[in-house]
Structures are given as C-alpha cells and as structure tokens.
Amino acid sequence: MYEYLHGTIAAVYPDHVVIDVNGVGYLVNTANPYRYQVSTDGQAVTIYVYQAVSDSAQTLYGFQDFAEKQLFLKLINVNGIGPKSALAILANPDHQGLMQAIRTNDVSFLTKFPGVGKKTAGQIVLDLQNKLDDLAPVDDGDLFTPEVAATDGTNPELDDAIAALTALGYRETAVKKITPKLKQFAGKSTNDYLSEGLRLLTN
C-alpha cells in the first residue's frame, strides 16, 4: 500500500491529476485537482494517497497532506460513504467546519454535499461524532472571500472549475444556479473559482 507519491505534476484534469514519479505517470483522483499546477520547472510535490482495490480496478485517491488523508479514511469507514463521496465532501476547504458539524450533529450542513441525504448524514454523525479527536490538525489553507468583478469573453479557469464541480457529483441545476455569481467573482485561478463555487454550494 502506498503512503505518498513524490514527483512532478504532469497533467491536471477536473477530477484527477497525473503525477510523474521517476518516469511513471500515476493517475490520482483528488478532491481539488486545481490545487496543483503542471510543473514547468521540475519542482516536485508530495501527494498522500490511498489505494482502493476491487475486482475490476485499482484506484488511487490523493490528498494534500496527511491530515486530509486521515479525515478521508474516517469518512469511508461510514456505512454509505464511498471514496467518491468522501472526496466530494473534502473538496470543500472548510474541514474544520465539517468536523464541527459532525461533532454538533449539524445534519443540514452535511446534506449539502452530493450523495449525502439525511440518513447518510445521520450515519456520519453516529459513526464519527466521538472519533475525531485523534485527527492531526487540518490545514484548511486560505478560504476565499468573494470580490465583485466583471468578466469579459471566455474564462477557461471558470469553465474548468464548473467541470470540476460536476465531476464531484454536484447536480447540474445547482451548478448552473451559482454560475452567474461565479462570473462576477474575481478569481485568479481555477482553484479560486472552485473554492468559491464550493462555498456557494454548501452555504
């Protein structure tokens, strides 16, 4: 079982990245691929990984740090939460808010994630409410504050962010509803737009 991969980012897609480790390209599904950038100068990154093995596939899931991987492992131990659903939950950068919602039985917060209904949200609380204290501190990074700015013409960063939201499992109607607000958001990168989109979808 792999603990992490250390190499250069060869490609970034809406639902995964390809990391080149000594000439071998590993396809790694990750909650927010646009946290990473294709390496143009040979700069290496470390991605913590979890390998899921089934009869038909071997799949790698990637995380920015060990704490995020720990939280993922907690989530997939919940009945009804698979790796894809866990990634969709972790895509929201407010991991502290997620853990607080679990601790305080905030079911309404949890049901905002794709694939999480009231029954599954209740199961998350039941299974994890008293099992989060052993987690390492989670670095949520910079949470984005929206700024109003008009956009002109095409916006490939916004298009990539919308594709990523859809890949995470959010309904097309929900994504379309927030798109006008994203068009007014002063994002500088796909990661900015994706983080803001996740904030709008879960608030």
Image: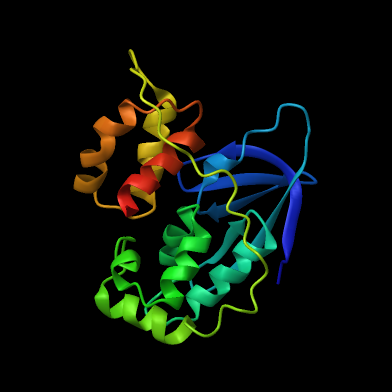
Q: Position of residue 48 (x, y in %)?
A: 68, 59
Is residue 130 visible in the rendered structure shown here?
yes
Farthest residue in the top direction?
152
| The one of 36 and 183 positioned closer to us in this rendering | 183
- Name above or below for residue 107 compared with residue 20: below
Residue drawn 43% across the image and 61% down it: 89
| The N terminus lies in quadrant | bottom right
| The one of 119 and 37 positioned closer to us in this rendering | 119
Residue 85: quarter of image: bottom left
Residue drawn 33% across the image and 13% down it: 152
Residue drawn 31% across the image and 27% down it: 183
Q: Position of residue 27 (x, y in %)?
A: 59, 51
Please name the colour scheme applied to the rendered image.
Answer: rainbow
Q: Position of residue 9 (x, y in %)?
A: 67, 40
| The one of 17 and 56 positioned closer to us in this rendering | 17
Is residue 83 visible in the rendered structure shown here?
no
Q: Position of residue 23 (x, y in %)?
A: 77, 43
55 left or right, relative to 3: left
